[in-house]
Amino acid sequence: MKRYRMLLFGLLSVLLLAGCGSGGGEKESLDFTVVEESEIPEELKSVIDEKKEAEFKLTYQSGEDLYLVAGAGMQETGGYSISVKDLYLQDGSICLETEFMGPSQGETVSRTPSYPYIVIRLPYREEPVVFL
């Protein structure tokens, strides 16, 4: 059932992409928390592990929480990260803008592959999610 909800959110996100950032309606900022790895629900960790090789975006509901996840896929080294640029409600959609960042020039990085992703938690909402 949870995977069905994730698929449904994903499909709705694609259909409603035009709603976010189009300048049509006012933006309402949403409160959120970036989730530490130790606080990610086990089932969601499993889904992330299955998808981490390639870029991915997904939603997941657990109880009264909605999780938004964006992953950048496999990177050849460490030093990569993803941050939240903006999370807002506009034209009936939850809009999430993230930014993928590479290592800083001169930064010492691990030579082992990395799989950067970010997990965001907010109170559950019915609106579809659009990843920008």
Image: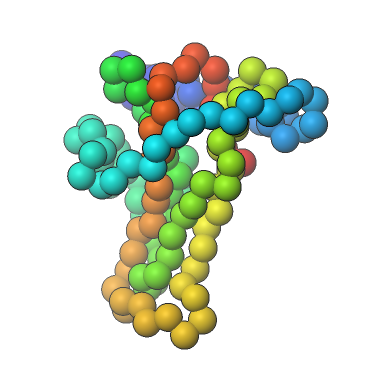
Indicate left or right for 22 with 48 as reference: right
- Locate residue 107, reporting x and y percent: 42, 80
Residue 129 drawn above or below residue 103: above
Decide: is 57 above or below 79.
above
- Residue 78 sits above or below residue 30 on the image: below
Residue in view at x 56 percent, y 36 percent: 87
Quadrant showing the N terminus = top left
Front in this rendered view, residue 90 or 70: 90
Question: Based on the displayed image, in which of its 4 quarters is residue 128 positioned?
Answer: top right
Extreme-bottom residue of the structure: 106
User: How are the colours assigned in the image?
Assistant: rainbow
Name which residue lies at 49% across and 75% down. Answer: 104
Residue 111 shows up from this direction:
yes
Q: Quadrant of the C terminus?
A: top right
At a point 31% along the width and 76% down the height, the residue shown is: 110
Instruction: State the image coordinates of residue 10 (x, y, percent, origin top left).
Output: 50, 28
In this image, 132 relative to 18: left or right? left
Quarter holding residue 16:
top right
Q: Is residue 2 visible?
A: no
Q: How many marks?
A: 0
- Determine the image quadrant of residue 95: top right
Q: Judge left or right: residue 61 versus residue 40.
A: right
Q: Position of residue 67 (x, y in %)?
A: 38, 31
Residue 74: x %, y % from top left: 39, 61
